[in-house]
Structure formats: structure tokens, C-alpha cells
Image: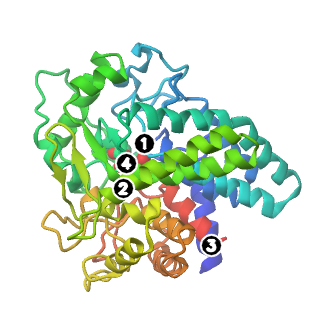
């Protein structure tokens, strides 16, 4: 069974491999996505260190002159909507060399760098050299990415990252964003046709048409100001401080800081460790003492966005004081989350089954996403929670035993949902099996 799982996961990644990059999924997402790439590279490093390096290299090639790593790289024609014709990245004031989307996604890339380096060193020989040379050569690019986030997305230094589209959070239609989206009211806009719903059996597993209108409205708003960050901050209808993104930046900057130190960039290391500390503090301050969960904030209205979603567990990603971590671990394993009595597998649902917004089959509103389980498990190990890490891994591997490598799963029935043969799901399986 276990060998079969690893073999099947490797076959999924081979199937989605275009040679220099891996598409996020065969039909639904036929391009390279930013945070998918990082998770995928972690999995691929277990098969081939040079191939994992190539994966990260192709993403970095799409970096914007500002330092931003874009959320999608369009390297071939496809029917995916919104494609390059709607994003129009070539109109940016300082445009990228490749055709990409014009927003970003959470910075999990340094997690991949650390994993590739570790695997290269474990294997030794040319794999070690390939991994070390790669990190040494590309460190300036990754540093620029983290620096851009810290400066452009937190200009006042609050320790929280602001986002301008829920696609930037990676959790598109999470209940986290219901309030901010209730204030996004699209006006006249160019017509469009969704293509995503063609690739899933059941339309209700995807965001609604109304949500899509708002998503595209925001894209058009950014194009209208030619992706000028200052202008976007003033004009965009969706302007939110994302606590989960912030936690990932805290984690990522700490890792980049450690790498910078190791590779002899002392000043960069100090700078990145300070960024990590700033965002870790921002996340800690966003924890609601009553619920024990971290909260996002709507920056247009100033309102705190309470939601029982995965983002509440941001401190488990960023690291926090021992008492905060202990309370969060207890909550995560408790009856409103992994320990909910109706769950088929005890892994974190994207929204708590006890929450009124919980929808067991719709995208980020309830289903379990294996890649999120992997992220929480990896972070737990780093933050001294080996027991939690082990429990999540064990349950996740039971879930993945159906060999569908689904994008997400119905938490109650265990049924596979969304895309099948999703690259990051296969990558998580491969890493857990190694
Ligand atoms: C979309 C590729 C991406 C992920 C996101 C996820 C989904 C794209 O798929 O968004 O068109 O809905 O929400 O986190 O990176 O796997």
C-alpha cells in the first residue's frame, strides 16, 4: 500500500510535468501557480533534486522587476480564465518579462529552498552541489521577494500583510472574505465566461458566479491603474490584512534569514530576521483572547474579521509563545476541528464544521485540503510540535489512500472533490512517504 501510494504520487507529478515546470493540475489549472510550485518542489526533491531546482528556477524567472513573484505564470496558451488577456501584465508600469497574473500568493518558497537543501545534503555528491549552488545563486531574487512583501504590503510596519484580492490569500472563497466581498459591488464590466466549472463534476464544489464577478472586477480595477501598488491601495475595493499570509511571511523570512546567514549575507540575514520578528508579533497581536484564534482585518472599514477558518491557526505557522501554541494545538485537535465527531479523517477542515458558514463540499468553505495538512504538519515539526506533526501525517496518509490525489476532500464522507491528480496533493504524499 505505501509503496503504491508513493509510486502513484510520482506518476501524478510526472504526468503534470511540462519539462521545466509542473502544472498545478492537468485540466483545471494548466499553468504554474506560485505557492503550488513551492509545495510541488518539496515533493519532487524526493525524486530528483535537479528537477526540483528547475521547478523553482522557472518560477523565479517570472519575478517582476519590483520583486513580486506573480501568482500564475502563463507559459502556454490555454482556455484557463482569467488568462493573460484579462490580466494584461504587459500594461504594468514596470512590466515582467513573461506573461503572468498581476497579484501574488503566500511566500512558502523558502520552505521549498530549505527542503531542497536538506534533501540535496542527505543524498550528497552532485545533488548536494546542485542544491547549494542553486540557493547561493538565487538568494538575491528570493530576498527581493520577501523585501517587496515587507515594504509594499506593510508600508506602515504593523506586521500584517495586506492583500488586494482573495486569490492572494490562496483561499479564494473562504468565509474569511465574506464581509469584505459584501462591499465589493461590480459596476459595468467587460463580459467573461468561466471555464473552471467545466472541469469539476459538480458546480457547487466551486465558488459561485457572483463571487467570480467580484474576483474579475478586482482584476479589472488593478489593470486600470497599471498595477501601480500605491494606486491599488487607494482604489481597490478589497483591502484586507491577511493574518495567515502574515504568518507565512514570518516563517518564510526566518528561513530566508537563516539561509542568508549560512551563505554569508550577514546584513540580509539581520534584515530578514527582523522582518520575521515583526510579522510574528503582528500575528500574535491578532489573536482573539476569547476564541484563541487569529483574526484578519478589513482595512476599508477597520473591522476585525472573526471567522472559524484555518487562518485562525496562523500562530501554529509563524511560531508563538509556548502558551499560545499549546492552546492552539488543543483547539486544532479539539471537537470543533480535527476532533469533530463526524469527521472521516482527523485533519484540519478549511472551515470549522461547527461554524454556520461550513459547507462540506464547497472549496475553501469546509473541505479538507491535504496540502494544508502538510503545511501545518511541517510547521508543527519546526515549532517543536512533533507529536501534532506525526498525528496529522498519519491521518493524511489514510485520507490519501484513495489514490485520487484530489484537490480537497469532503470531511464527513471522505469523498474526493475538485480536481483529481492535483500536483501539490501528490507532492505532499511523496514528502510524507520519504
Ligand atoms: C482558481 C492552484 C490554485 C491554488 C489556490 C486555489 C486555486 C485557482 O487553485 O485557485 O482558479 O480557483 O484556491 O490556492 O494555488 O492549485
Between tags 2 and 4, which lies in front? 2
Q: CA distance from mark 3 to mark 1?
A: 27 Å
Label 2: how many residues lie within 10 Å, few (<14), some (14-19) or many (20+)? many
Pick the front one: 177 or 10: 177
Label 4: how many residues lie within 10 Å, few (<14), some (14-19) or many (20+)? some
Mark sitting on residue 170: 4
Question: Residue drawn 30% across and 38% down?
Answer: 195
Q: CA distance from mark 2 to mark 3?
A: 32 Å
Q: Quadrant of residue 386?
A: bottom right
Are the residues flagged by discs 1 and 4 in contact, CB closer than 8 Å?
yes
Question: Residue drawn 48% across and 17% down?
Answer: 95
Are the residues flagged by discs 4 and 3 in contact, CB closer than 8 Å?
no
Q: Which residue is mark 2?
A: 283
Q: Quadrant of residue 79?
A: top left
Distance from mark 3 CB to nearest ligand 1 atom below 8 Å: no
- Mark earlier in primary sequence (1, 2): 1
Are the residues flagged by discs 1 and 2 in contact, CB closer than 8 Å?
no
Rendering coords of residue 379 (x, y %): 51, 65
Q: Is residue 404 visible?
A: no
- Mark earlier in primary sequence (4, 3): 4
Q: Indicate the secondary structure of the residue bearing disc 3.
A: helix
Label 3: how many residues lie within 10 Å, few (<14), some (14-19) or many (20+)? some
Label 1: how many residues lie within 10 Å, few (<14), some (14-19) or many (20+)? many
Mark sitting on residue 105: 1
Q: CA distance from mark 1 to mark 4?
A: 6 Å
- Mark earlier in primary sequence (2, 3): 2
Amino acid at each position: 500500500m505505501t509503496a503504491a501510494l508513493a509510486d502513484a504520487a510520482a506518476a501524478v507529478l510526472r504526468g503534470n510535468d511540462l519539462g521545466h515546470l509542473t502544472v498545478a493540475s492537468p485540466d483545471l489549472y494548466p499553468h504554474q501557480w506560485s505557492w503550488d510550485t513551492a509545495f510541488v518542489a518539496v515533493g519532487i526533491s524526493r525524486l530528483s533534486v535537479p528537477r526540483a531546482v528547475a521547478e523553482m528556477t522557472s518560477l523565479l524567472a517570472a519575478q517582476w522587476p519590483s520583486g513580486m513573484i506573480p501568482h500564475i505564470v502563463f507559459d502556454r496558451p490555454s482556455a484557463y480564465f482569467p488568462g493573460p488577456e484579462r490580466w494584461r501584465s504587459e500594461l504594468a508600469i514596470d512590466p515582467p518579462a513573461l506573461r503572468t497574473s498581476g497579484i501574488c500568493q503566500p511566500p512558502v518558497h523558502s520552505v521549498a529552498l530549505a527542503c531542497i537543501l536538506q534533501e540535496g545534503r542527505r543524498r550528497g555528491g552532485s545533488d548536494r552541489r546542485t542544491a547549494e549552488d542553486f540557493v547561493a545563486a538565487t538568494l538575491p531574487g528570493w530576498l527581493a521577494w520577501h523585501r517587496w512583501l515587507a515594504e509594499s504590503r506593510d508600508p506602515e510596519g504593523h506586521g500584517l500583510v495586506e492583500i488586494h484580492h482573495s486569490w492572494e490569500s490562496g483561499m479564494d472563497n473562504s468565509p474569511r472574505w465574506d464581509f469584505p466581498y459584501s462591499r465589493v459591488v461590480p459596476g459595468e464590466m467587460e463580459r467573461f465566461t468561466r471555464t473552471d466549472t467545466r472541469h469539476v463534476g459538480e458546480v457547487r464544489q466551486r465558488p459561485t458566479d457572483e463571487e467570480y464577478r467580484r474576483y474579475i472586477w478586482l482584476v479589472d480595477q488593478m489593470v486600470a491603474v497599471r498595477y501601480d501598488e500605491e494606486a491599488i491601495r487607494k482604489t481597490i475595493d478589497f483591502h484586507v490584512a491577511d493574518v495567515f499570509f502574515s504568518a507565512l511571511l514570518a516563517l518564510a523570512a526566518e528561513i530566508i534569514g537563516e539561509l542568508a546567514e549560512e551563505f554569508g549575507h550577514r546584513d540580509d540575514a539581520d534584515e530578514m530576521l527582523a522582518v520575521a520578528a515583526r510579522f510574528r508579533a503582528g500575528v500574535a497581536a491578532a489573536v482573539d483572547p476569547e476564541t484563541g484564534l487569529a483574526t484578519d482585518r478589513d482595512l476599508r472599514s477597520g473591522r476585525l474579521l472573526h471567522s472559524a477558518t484555518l487562518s485562525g491557526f496562523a500562530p501554529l505557522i509563524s511560531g508563538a509563545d509556548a502558551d499560545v501554541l499549546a492552546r492552539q494545538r488543543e483547539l486544532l485537535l479539539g471537537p470543533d476541528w480535527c476532533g469533530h465527531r463526524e469527521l472521516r479523517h482527523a485533519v484540519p477542515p478549511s472551515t470549522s464544521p461547527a461554524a454556520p458558514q461550513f459547507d462540506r463540499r464547497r472549496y475553501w468553505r469546509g473541505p479538507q485540503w491535504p496540502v494544508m495538512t502538510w503545511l501545518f504538519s511541517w510547521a508543527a515539526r519546526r515549532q517543536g510540535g512533533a507529536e501534532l506533526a506525526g498525528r496529522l501525517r498519519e491521518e493524511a496518509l489514510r485520507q490519501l489512500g484513495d489514490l485520487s490525489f484530489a484537490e480537497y476532500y469532503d470531511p464527513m464522507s471522505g469523498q474526493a472533490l475538485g480536481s483529481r491528480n492535483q500536483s501539490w496533493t501528490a507532492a505532499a504524499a511523496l514528502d510524507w512517504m520519504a
